[in-house]
Image (cartoon, rainbow, N blue to C red):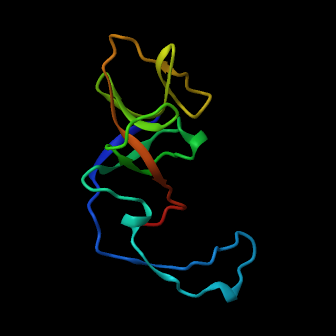
Amino acid sequence: MANAILLGPAGSSAHELPFFSSRIPAGFPSPAQDHLEAQLSLDELLNVRAPHTYLVRASGDSMTGVGIYDGDLLVVDRALPAYSGAVVIAALAGEVFVKRLQQDARGICLHSANPHYPPRQINAEDELQIWGVVRHSIHRHGQHD
């Protein structure tokens, strides 16, 4: 099961990072493609809209089918309306999850993106809260600190 661990609101940053316009090949690198294009703000790249954006850390393996892995950092926008098919942060019975929201004539259902976890149909007595729509996931490669 993938839980979400709330980290806090995302504040704006004054730091800009170098951006190289050339795409980096996954095969053999080309030394001719190493010119700096511009400075890029992660706030702009990730469309951080403070105070509506916050960060959570994913826990578990139930969302691997959409590229969200244990420990990934999720950028969540609470101002966006949740829609059917969106990956959302949902609170149900005091527990917070990251799941895909499905709404149809039968009602609301929270789906994992891993076939080992069954969907959770939301009943009328369930207290479901949608805390925001996941806009980005940031995945760490390796164990570097």
Tell me: residue 13, above or below residue 97: below
Q: Nearer the viewer, residue 80 or 28?
A: 80
The percent position of residue 141, horizontal first and vertical second, equals 54, 61
Q: Is residue 59 left or right of residue 117?
A: left
Can residue 15 be seen by looking at this rendering?
yes
The residue sitting at the right extreme is: 28
Q: Position of residue 91 (x, y in %)?
A: 33, 29
Number of numbered callouts drawn = 0
Residue 124 picture location, percent across and down: 36, 11
Name above or below for residue 113 compared with residue 136: above
Q: Residue 19 location in percent, x, y?
A: 50, 78
Residue pictured at 39% horizontal, 66% vertical:
44
Relative height, residue 112 to residue 68 (above, below):
above
| Quadrant in which the C terminus appears | bottom left
Locate residue 17: give its quadrant. bottom left
Q: Nearer the viewer, residue 20 or 27?
A: 20
Is residue 72 visible in this depiction of the protein? no
Left or right for 82, reference 94: right
Nearer to me, 59 or 13: 13
Relative to the observer, which residue lies in front, 123 or 64?
A: 123
Residue at position x 37%, y 47% in the image? 76
Q: Residue at x 55, y 26 (%)?
A: 117
Residue at figure coordinates x 28%, y 26% from the top left: 94
